[in-house]
Image (cartoon, rainbow, N blue to C red):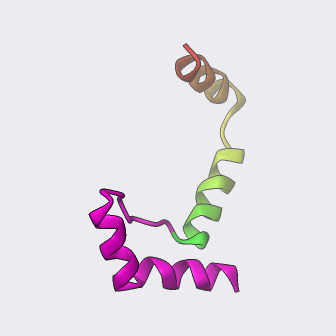
Amino acid sequence: ILRKAFTDTMKDPEFVADATKAKLGVDPVSSEELERIIAGLFKLDAVLVARLKDILYK
């Protein structure tokens, strides 16, 4: 129910107009795509994760 409500809101012309007026970007990622991205993060090699942490937390 919540996923559909989110998707419907992101497609609502009035919401998009209000967000645009407020200079907020409306470029949502679907829940399926987000799940795929997160699943991929859990499959990253430990050495790569350590290197990314080093880069991000400098």
The residue under the point 40% across, 77% down is 15
Residue 5 included in the magenta stretch of the image? yes
The residue under the point 60% across, 70% down is 31
The image shows residue 36 at horizontal and vertical percentages of 61, 62
The image shows residue 57 at horizontal and vertical percentages of 59, 18
Q: Quadrant of residue 25?
A: bottom left
- When the figure is inspected, residue 56 is found, relative to residue 41, above or below; the finding is above
Q: Quadrant of residue 11?
A: bottom left
Q: Name the quarter where the N terminus is drawn.
A: bottom right
Residue 7 included in the magenta stretch of the image? yes
The image shows residue 54 at horizontal and vertical percentages of 59, 17
The residue under the point 66% across, 40% down is 44
**Of helix, strand and loop, which mostly describes the magenta segment?**
helix
The image shows residue 13 at horizontal and vertical percentages of 34, 84
- Please state which of residues 31 and 12 is positioned toward the viewer in this rendering: 12
- When the figure is inspected, residue 21 is found, relative to residue 45, above or below; the finding is below
Magenta segment range?
1-29
Q: Name the quarter where the C terminus is drawn.
A: top right
Task: Indicate left or right for 17 with 30 as reference.
Answer: left
Task: Indicate left or right for 46 with 12 as reference.
Answer: right
- Please state which of residues 7 and 55 is positioned toward the viewer in this rendering: 7
- Please state which of residues 55 and 11 is positioned toward the viewer in this rendering: 11
- When the figure is inspected, residue 57 is found, relative to residue 36, above or below; the finding is above
